[in-house]
Amino acid sequence: AHDPSPEPSPPKFTHISSTTRERMVCKLAINGAGGRMGRRLLALAVADPDIELVQAVEYAAHPLQGKMVKDIEPEAQSEVKLTSQLEKGADVVIDFSSPDGTRVIAKRAEELGIALVIGTTAKDFAWRADIRKSSDKVPMIHAQNFSLGVNLMFKVAGQIAKALGDDFDMEIVEGHHNQKVDAPSGTAMGIAGGICDAVGKDIQKDLVYGREGQVGKRKRGEIGCHALRMGSEIGLHTVYYASNFERLEFTHRASSRDVFAAGAIKASKWINGKAAGYYEMTDVLGL
């Protein structure tokens, strides 16, 4: 029989919009939380309404082990305590630690099904390939740098190199604070990778790291890579393109570590809920 009563009005909200999905809270763990970058990540994570800081991790013998986050970083008013192992409960873990620390956290994230955002760098191609294997089981971003400007530099440096060709000598110079332990920087290697990809060179064979002694004339097509360690420099990268008649300099300078921390947090929110696989920072930034 026909029901003469009027149909009820549709509810005001009948679906979850893409904007709402993007604003879903991401439960975040930070590995390397007691370091320079780790402390800035704590500060920005606690301040972000779309992030819930659930874990802060450091190696077992770290002098701050067991302390509350608010005692490690005054800008991060959280009572989460520093612990020595990643546990269940996080959606994503950001790692700024050491090559060995990254290896441990990647395996642990695999076991727990936690997405990985890795900012630890090293000029060790085998190590990077080994870490990447975790992306078979969980979503991963392993970035040489998390800033928008630097990721643009990776791309544009290659475009410039391709346009100029081997008539221009190319040299990459990076500068960082005097406490940085690896050289060249991951960012310098990212720039070199962008250039090599654009012009068909092999990053493992065509880079020259510094020069000393009777090295002979500069070989056509080689790419120089040099590291400066000085004071409190946060991050300075310049690519020189020089012919016999002119020179082009392409520079990026970071004025705050927060540019890297903010990028890593942006990446964490982006990768939360993604399928297992290896993603690039260019995916996050839409470049």
Image (cartoon, helix red, strand yellow):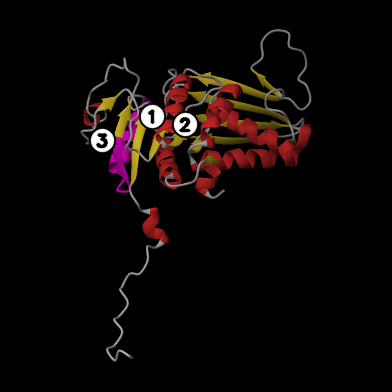
Name which residue lies at 74% across and 36% down. Answer: 199
Quarter of the rendering containing residue 262: top left
Give coordinates of residue 231: x percent, y percent: 43, 20
Give the structural element (helix, strand or loop) at label 2.
loop
Residue 37, labelled with which disc?
1
Disc 1 residue type? Met
Name which residue lies at 35% across and 69% down. Answer: 14
**106 over 148 or under it: above or below:** above
N-terminal of the pair, mark 3 or mark 2, is 3
**24 over 74 or under it: above or below:** below
Disc 3 residue type? Ala
Disc 2 residue type? Gly
**65 over 10 or under it: above or below:** above
Quarter of the rendering containing residue 22: bottom left
Name which residue lies at 27% across and 20% down. Answer: 65
Residue marked by disc 3 = 76
Give how far apart the Cα atoms at labels 2 and 1 are.
9 Å
Residue 234 at least partly seen: no
Give coordinates of residue 7: x percent, y percent: 31, 84
Give coordinates of residue 127: x percent, y percent: 56, 23
N-terminal of the pair, mark 3 or mark 1, is 1
Residue marked by disc 2 = 119
Give coordinates of residue 208: x percent, y percent: 68, 20
Give how far apart the Cα atoms at labels 3 and 1 are.
13 Å
Closest to the observer: 13 or 254? 13
Give the structural element (helix, strand or loop) at label 3.
loop
Magenta residues span 36-54
The verdict on residue 50 being magenta is yes
Quarter of the rendering containing residue 101: top left
Callout 3 touching callout 2 (CB < 8 Å): no
Callout 2 touching callout 1 (CB < 8 Å): yes
Answer with left or right where residue 33 lies relative to residue 245. left
